[in-house]
Image: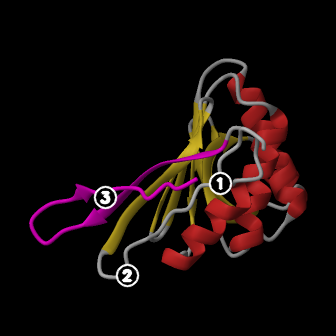
Amino acid sequence: MGQKSSKEYEISPNLSLSSFEMGRDDVNVVCTYGKISIWFGRQAPDIVIGQILLGISNIDNSAVHELELICDFDEIMEYESHGYVLVSYAKSKNGYRTTFNVPFSSKKALFHLAGSITEELKDKDTILDCYWTGDDSDIMRLYEELSNIEGWKLKGINYKDDAKEKQSDIIISD
C-alpha cells in the first residue's frame, strides 16, 4: 500500500458556502462566488502557475483577470496582440492609464499572464484576482482539477451563518 491517503471532502448542502481555500506551501487559492484570489509565493514554480491558470480555464473559461497599468500608447497594441482585451484607456501624466481583461478563454493570454507572474515573483510575492461565475459545484470541480498538482491540499471550508461566519469540520477519510 502507498503512503498517500485518499481524501474525501464534502460541502454541506444545507449551508451557504462563504469561501473554499486550497493550495500548497508556495501557493494559496481562495474561491468565493464571483472571485478567485491566488497568492503566489516567490518560490512558486512556473509549471504550477501554468497548471493553476489552465485549471481555472478548464472549469470556467469565461473567467477574467482585470489588469490596470500605465503604459505608452504603442504598448496597448502589444498587450492586445497577446490576447488581452482593452476595456478602457485615458491619457495621464506618465502615459496611458489602461484597463485590460485577461480572458481565460485565450491560451495565448494565459501564457503571457503566466510569464508576467513569473517575472513579478523574482522581486516579491504576487496576488492575482480572477473574476468568475463559479458556484459550489464549480469550486469542487476546480479543487479536483488542481488536486493533480504535487502537494495540493484542502486548507479550509468556510460557510456563511446568519449571525457570523464559522469554519466547518472538513471530512477527511482514508
Camera-near label (1 vs 3) is 1
Which residue sits at x=63%, y=58%? 65
Which residue sits at x=81%, y=47%? 50
Q: Are marks 1 and 3 in contact (CB under 8 Å)?
A: no
Q: Are marks 2 and 1 in contact (CB under 8 Å)?
A: no
Q: CA distance from mark 2 to mark 3?
A: 12 Å
**Pointer 1: what residue?**
6
**Pointer 2: what residue?**
13
Q: What is the three-letter code of the residue carrying label 3?
A: Ser
Q: What is the three-letter code of the residue carrying label 1?
A: Ser
Could you say where residue 93 lies in the image, as x and y percent from the top left? 56, 36
Toward which corner of the image does residue 132 lie, by quadrant? bottom right
Q: What is the three-letter code of the residue carrying label 2?
A: Pro
**Pointer 3: what residue?**
168
In the picture as drawn, the residue positioned furthest to the left comes out as 163
Nearer-N-terminus badge (2/3): 2
Q: Secondary structure at mark 3?
A: loop
Q: Is residue 64 visible?
A: no
Could you say where residue 125 lies in the image, as x and y percent from the top left? 59, 26
Could you say where residue 111 lies in the image, as x and y percent from the top left? 87, 50
Q: Secondary structure at mark 2?
A: loop
Toward which corner of the image does residue 83 lie, by quadrant? bottom right
Magenta stretch: includes residue 111: no
Q: Which residues are magenta?
A: 152-174
